[in-house]
Amino acid sequence: MSEPARLVGPVEVIGTGLVGTSVALACRRAGLEVLLSDRNDEHVRTASGLGAGRARRPEDRPQLVVVAVPPDALGDTINAALTASDAVVTDVGSIKARPLAQVLADPGAAARAERYVGSHPMAGSELSGPLSATPMLFEGRPWAITPHPGSDVAAVELVEDLVRLAGAVPAWLTPQEHDKAVARISHVPHLVSSLVAGRLAGAPSNHLSLSGQGVRDVTRVAAGDPRLYGQIVAGNAAAVGELLSELRADLDAMIEAIADDAREDLEDLLGRGVTGTRAIPGKHGAPATATVSVFVTVPDHPGELARLLADAVASEVNVEDIRIDHDTSRPTGLVELVVDQRSGERLVVSLESRGWVTHR
Amino acid sequence: MSEPARLVGPVEVIGTGLVGTSVALACRRAGLEVLLSDRNDEHVRTASGLGAGRARRPEDRPQLVVVAVPPDALGDTINAALTASDAVVTDVGSIKARPLAQVLADPGAAARAERYVGSHPMAGSELSGPLSATPMLFEGRPWAITPHPGSDVAAVELVEDLVRLAGAVPAWLTPQEHDKAVARISHVPHLVSSLVAGRLAGAPSNHLSLSGQGVRDVTRVAAGDPRLYGQIVAGNAAAVGELLSELRADLDAMIEAIADDAREDLEDLLGRGVTGTRAIPGKHGAPATATVSVFVTVPDHPGELARLLADAVASEVNVEDIRIDHDTSRPTGLVELVVDQRSGERLVVSLESRGWVTHR
């Protein structure tokens, strides 16, 4: 791929929350002029103060407008942007089909809509607002680009330039396919996580005291803002509803298998889950490779964790993941180093030779 | 608390898988004699080779027997252990009421059952078998002790000694309460995680390529062994079935709210999920404290991660968690350091002064 040359700016960012301000910072990092607007002047000042650009002025003529507003406001904001100038317009919303329908439904939309190409970076955070923004937010992440049949090729290329400039990996999908995909890999996992977490609310504290890492992982995303997720899900109601109904059928089958002690049926359902976990692409888009965990006792002193890491890398083993025990009530902690299966033994020998107590 | 003095051994461990061998190693670490048995002689030899004890001989007279076999085999194995000697017997199974009922149902059980006290360490791993065992497995973890009304006090004390010797934190529950608790904080999260993962099996790969950290977290536990989890769930069918039915009612309400675009109802359901995530006890059993994430760009060279950690701790900030970006397809990675909210600014200033590029 050649370096982006077609995108020269200025880039206007409408909506200076976490994602909008992060896009603006990535454009500034690439040397582009960035124009900021937001219904909330305070957010523009904050983003501007972070070096994300300057407030848009009426006479500005952006080359590309990036709409980064909540799902409910996408259609109107995209339409207003298409009408306000001749710029190419994209958005970074979590849903793609409904905003497009809103754009195409606008009177006299067909010609204007040539300049619209939806997109969606698969990056976010439990945090929100411009203060959480970073130009690194999109680095190495998938960023869906979802042209519609009337999208101008030059407009599509400009959006691709934005994606590459942000360090993201373009994923080409139709708006409809995109919405089905995120229903499955984002919206439904979030909703179901929320249902599991909802069953914890009001549970006796001595029951909750038995909580381990499993329930923490399953429910982490459920901490997200209900208003935002309500908008996202409502904007993808058909695809989400269909998958939730499929999941309910599986849940019914599971409840029945448990009630009837139909062990094989239950194992089949659990086995399909195992297959599903293996379908998620691993690091670098490659199939997940077998890893092994090495546990190391680490005294709870400042510096000990760093010393461990220094010793781990001295053995030239690539540490793929690090997990720090959250549950400990002890003065020593356990650190789990996840490494490629073939490297496990080398890591253990190396760490033990440096005085660490390891456990497999 | 005084040091364990009542538990002097020998301790017999029946079932030398991950948990049994880890119990054995913890007892050995404390200087106790450990006797091992397993239906699989190979496992005994492996565990013995790891220093977990020696094979049990017919003339041995254990003080305490720890039954660490799969759920389906618990009742029979506990009964056999109670009959074989005068030792106190505990088990480390994931379910407590059904094995107890099996013990009490045995002819002439009442007197023998005085010596039985169930227990359940809240520790495990996606790994299994004696080679994954470690005496650290239980360090700082809750370990439920579930005496029945006929349990002898001396027997309960002996099991408490075992829990403390393993570095775990005793949690006192009745067998019935225990089963309800683990249905909520372990079994149902696992089952629902499995249903979400099941919906990924067979999905188009371009859809799956959009997968982020959220779906990975929600589905991680679903990778567990279907046969083992089938036994666990079948052994806790009543409590699990009840909760799954409650969850199905919530799911029905969610499907209806989405179909009707009843936004407030949907937000209420998501809001209850947020409340639930906050109900999970934080580190050290204290309420979760507010944390902030600092992202740091780390070149993908050996040693860079260690250098980052060294610099992070040099700022005397307690790093609560580290997350390494799994999705990157770039030569640089992003490392997320999670620290107490009040320490975030100090960490950023400290790291920047050492040449790191940080992002909030």
Image (cartoon, coloured by chain):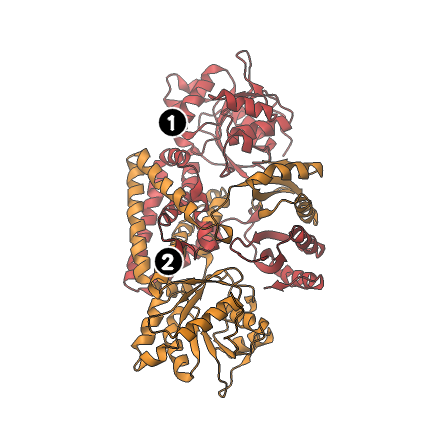
Chain colours: A red, B orange
Query: Measured from the top left, where is residue A118 in percent x and y?
Result: 47, 29
Q: Which residue is more in the foreground, A122 or B95?
A: B95
In the figure, A31 relative to B122: above or below? above
Does residue A140 appear in this view?
Answer: no
- Give the crowd class for mark 1: few <14, some 14-19, many >=20 residues within 10 Å: few
The chain identifier of the residue carrying mark 1 reads A
Query: Measured from the top left, where is residue B310 in percent x and y?
Result: 69, 47
In the figure, A353 relative to A230: above or below? below
Element marked by disc 1: helix
* Labels 1, 2: front one: 2
Which residue was labeled with disc 1? A101
Which residue was labeled with disc 2? B181
Does residue A33 appear in this view?
Answer: yes
**Amino acid beneath label 1:** Ala
Q: Do the residues bearing badges 1 and 2 touch, measured as CB atoms within 8 Å?
A: no
Q: Which residue is more in the foreground, B168 or A297?
A: B168
Q: Is residue A251 left or right of residue A136?
A: left
The chain identifier of the residue carrying mark 2 reads B
